[in-house]
Image (cartoon, helix red, strand yellow):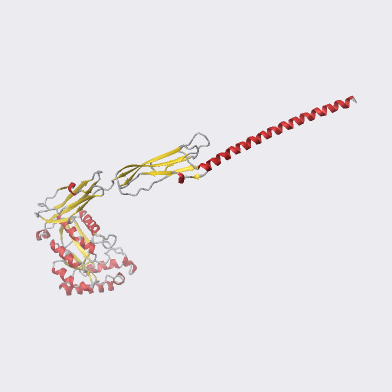
């Protein structure tokens, strides 16, 4: 009986220990739950605070509650714009880790006036969650970047005969900020009308922002080509040749050539029958009239040797009827090295060059191209191509087309440039050096 009581005491004690342990574990679990709920509540409070504020900060703060995480300028902190230019602000970057891009919440203040020179400020501001104002700024400089413009009265290219007096036709100058600067224009020149040459008159003016505008007038001092020059041309000779005409521009071209006593060579066609009478006029004024083609139709003339010579002879008869003289010089349509003939007859160019020579004709290509048949469309481009080509050789055979108005317009400049630089212009004849390209077919 005594042993049974001892066993009951041990069981009660063991139960007490288990109950105490269970209560302790429960308290720990409860404490952990309370802490978790509290942390969540704090986090939730922060999110709520962010959502309510919706604002950004200038720099990243040390506390985890700082918002936003980014506030910076887009673009440079100092910008230059031209006077009168519309200012478009690059803006700022404002980003919050909870809300994302909140740039639209930034307040922008600007006093930029692009109609007036000066430095201006653009300010950007926000408030953080504690009501602190976060600020950025940008400097915008309105500057005058445009140079004044000098407008020349009269022509920018002037031709003077040797010894002729020159009177400047004048100029004007204006600036987008300073207005009329004509009185401030200065000019320098190296003009000497007693010597043949090409001279420049340089005009310059500077505005209050130190922008400089310039203009140049080119003066050609020339002497009409003399008969003695053509008899003893020296080693600087230019043969001007014109293909595909005559046409509506040919008459004015003849007048320009007469003005400088320059003779040229016309490789004529019958593409424009209404102007056929100008073939006679070309010959009457002392120019060489040579055969190019009756039809200038590649598919016809290069279909066979017979077709080519039928075309050539048809043009030959027209020239004889117009000038009373049989032509002796020929230029192949497309040149001796044309490749278009391959489409119609393989090897025909090699055979034609031999046949022409056997018949007593002289054929001539070119070594200076104006580019007017394709690629260039302006007088200046033709002038540059031709004068550059001439300057690189002693004997130049120049290709132009008198059916292109812009190319004809460049001829006077080319002639005066040549005369001023010691070149002699001659027409081709049977004793002239013929430029031959290698047949490509």
385, above or below 295, in the image: above
Judge whether residue 97 can be spotted in this image. no
Residue 373 is left or right of residue 25, and the answer is left
Q: Quadrant of residue 226?
A: bottom left
212, above or below 393, in the image: above
In the displayed orientation, state which residue is furthest to the top: 2
Towards the viewer: 397 or 349: 397
Q: Residue 66 appears at what percent x and percent y?
A: 50, 37
Specify the quadrant that holds the N terminus.
Answer: top right
- Residue at 63% in and 36% down: 36
Specify the quadrant that holds the C terminus.
Answer: bottom left
Q: Residue 16 appears at what percent x and percent y?
A: 78, 29
- Residue at 43% in and 41% down: 125
- Residue at 13% in and 64% down: 258
Residue 66 is left or right of residue 410, and the answer is right
In the displayed orientation, state which residue is furthest to the front: 131
Q: Quadrant of residue 417?
A: bottom left
Q: Quadrant of residue 328?
A: bottom left
18, above or below 362, in the image: above
Towards the viewer: 221 or 323: 221
Judge whether residue 174 can be spotted in this image. yes
């Amino acid at each position: 009986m005594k042993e049974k009581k001892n066993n009951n005491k041990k069981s009660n004690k063991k139960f007490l220990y288990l109950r105490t342990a269970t209560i302790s574990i429960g308290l720990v679990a409860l404490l952990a739950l309370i802490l978790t709920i509290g942390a969540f509540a704090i986090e939730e409070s922060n999110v709520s605070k962010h959502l309510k504020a919706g604002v950004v900060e200038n720099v990243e703060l040390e506390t985890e509650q700082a918002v936003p995480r980014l506030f910076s300028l887009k673009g440079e902190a100092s910008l230059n714009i031209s006077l009168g230019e519309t200012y478009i602000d690059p803006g700022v970057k404002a980003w919050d880790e909870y809300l994302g891009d909140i740039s639209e919440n930034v307040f922008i203040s600007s006093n930029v006036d692009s109609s007036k020179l000066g430095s201006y400020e653009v300010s950007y501001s926000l408030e953080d969650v504690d009501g602190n104002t976060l600020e950025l700024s940008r400097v915008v400089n309105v500057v005058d970047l445009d140079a004044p413009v000098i407008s020349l009265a009269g022509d920018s290219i002037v031709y003077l005969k040797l010894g002729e007096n020159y009177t400047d036709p004048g100029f004007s100058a204006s600036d987008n900020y300073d207005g009329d600067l004509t009185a401030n224009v200065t000019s320098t020149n190296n003009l000497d009308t007693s010597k043949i040459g090409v001279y420049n008159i340089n005009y310059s003016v500077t505005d209050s922002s130190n922008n400089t505008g310039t203009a140049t007038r080119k003066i050609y001092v020339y002497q009409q080509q003399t008969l003695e020059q053509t008899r003893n041309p020296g080693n600087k000779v230019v043969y001007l040749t014109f293909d595909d005409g005559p046409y509506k521009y040919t008459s004015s071209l003849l007048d320009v050539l007469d003005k400088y006593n320059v003779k040229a060579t016309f490789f004529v066609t019958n593409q424009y029958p209404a102007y056929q009478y100008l073939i006679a006029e070309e010959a009457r004024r002392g120019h060489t009239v040579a055969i190019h083609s009756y039809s200038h139709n590649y598919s016809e003339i290069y279909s066979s040797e017979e077709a080519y010579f039928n075309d050539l002879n048809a043009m030959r008869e027209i020239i004889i009827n117009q000038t009373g003289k049989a032509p002796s010089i020929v230029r192949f349509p497309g040149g001796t090295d044309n490749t278009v003939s391959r489409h119609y007859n393989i090897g025909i160019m090699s055979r034609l060059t031999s046949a022409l020579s056997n018949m007593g004709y002289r054929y001539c290509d070119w070594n200076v191209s104006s580019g007017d048949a394709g690629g260039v469309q302006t007088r200046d481009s033709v002038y540059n191509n031709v004068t550059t080509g001439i300057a690189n050789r002693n004997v130049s055979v120049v290709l132009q087309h008198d059916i292109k108005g812009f190319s004809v317009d460049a001829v006077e400049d080319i002639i005066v440039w040549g005369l001023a630089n010691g070149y002699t212009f001659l027409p081709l004849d049977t004793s002239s050096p013929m430029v031959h390209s290698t047949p490509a077919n």
